Amino acid sequence: MEPQTPTSRRVLIAKPRGYCAGVDRAVVAVEKALEQYGAPVYVRKQIVHNTHVVKTLEAKGAIFVEETEEVPEGEIVVFSAHGVSPAVHSEAQQRKLRTIDATCPLVTKVHNEAKRFAGQDYGILLIGHEGHEEVEGTAGEAPEHIQLVDGLGSVDGIQVKDPEKLVWLSQTTLSVDETVETVARLKERFPTLIDPPSDDICYATQNRQVAVKEIAAQSQLVIVVGSENSSNSKRLVEVAKDHGADASYLVDNATFIQDEWLDGVTTVGVTSGASVPEELVEQVLARLAQHGFGDVEEVESVRESMRFSLPHELRKDLRAS
C-alpha cells in the first residue's frame, strides 16, 4: 500500500455498525406477518426509528399508527422494538386485536427488572429521555415506583420516598459515558443506590459507541447515518465529537451530505445507527467516492454474533386464534 499523501482522501468505516439483533428481529417480524397474513398489517409506532425502513414496509402493506385505537377491531397489530406498557397490551386485548410483540428482548429485560424491583417496593430511577417510546413503555410497568432521570441536569431535582431502597435502570440506547456520569452523580446524592443486575444499555449501543470512538480519533469529519428520532444514532454523533472528530453530522441518507462539510477534509469516518440498513451506508460511500474519497478502510472494534428468535406469535396462526 502506498503511503498516504496529505492530499489523499480516505474513509474509515466503523464495524460494528447498522442493524442490531433486536432491529433485525422486529423488521423481519413485520415482513413475516405480511407474508403469512397478507396486507394490511398494522404497526403501533415506527417499528424501528428509521425513515427508510418505515417507508419500505409501508410499500409492502404495513400501516403505521400512533395508538392501538386506530387499528380496526380484530386486526393484526405489531408492537415496535421499543416496547409498550401493560396498558397498551390491555387496550389491544379489549379491542380483540391479534398482537405480535416485536419488543427487543433486551428492552423486555429492563421491563422485567422494573416489575421485579417494584414488586419489592423499591423506588426506581429510570435514566432516559422524556417522551421516548422505550421510556414510556418501561415506566408504564410500575408508574407509581418509577421516576425519570433525564440526564445530569435533572439529578438535583430528584426526590425519593426511601433513599435506602432505591435502584437505577436505564433506557437501552443511551450514551454509555453520559450514563456513567449520571449514575455517579446520583450516587453522590443517594450513596446506597443499587445497580441493576446487569448493564441495561444494550450490547449494540455500547459496541457502536466503542467503534465510533476509534474512527473519530483519526477523522476530521464523522458522518452518522440514521434518522433524527433515533436515540442511539444521535448519541453516536455526540460520541464522535467528544472523541476527536472536528465535526460530526447525522444524515438520513446520502442526499443530506453537504459538499462544504468535505472542504479541507482528508479523512471521513462513517458509521450508522442500530436501525439503519446497510444499503444507506453504501449510498453514503458512493457519494463520498464522487468527491475523491475512494480509499475505504473498515475498522473493526468488536465482533458481534448476537441473534434473537422471532416473536412466538409468528409460530401460530393468529387468524384462527
Image (spheres, rainbow, N blue to C red):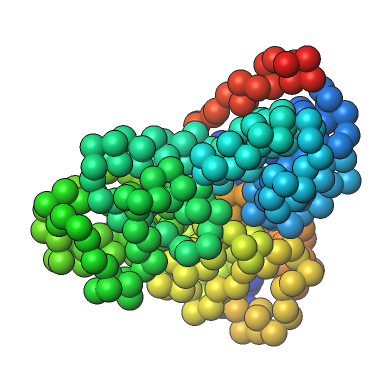
From the viewer's side, name the closer residue of 266 and 157.
157
Q: Is residue 55 above or below residue 182?
A: above
Q: Quadrant of the C terminus?
A: top right
On the question of residue 18 being in view, the answer is no
Who's the residue at 50% across and 53% down the image? 136
Instruction: Report the side of 151 relative to 257 (left or right).
Output: left
Q: Nearer the viewer, residue 132 or 200?
A: 132
How many circles with numbers are drawn on the protein? 0
Give whichever of 74, 277 is nearer the camera: 74
Q: Name the residue furthest front.
A: 94
Q: Is residue 134 visible?
A: yes
Q: On the picture, is 59 further left or further right than 54?
A: right
Tell me residue 169's x, y (percent).
Answer: 33, 49
Q: Quick check: 53 left or right of 157?
A: right
Rendered residue at 72%/30% (across/down): 96
Position above or below: 127 against 40: below
Q: Is residue 197 above or below residue 151?
A: above
* Whether residue 45 is situated above or below residue 92 in the rendered picture: below
- In the rendering, at what x and y percent does residue 313 appear? 65, 22
Task: Pinpoint residue 84: horizontal percent, then vertical percent.
Answer: 55, 43
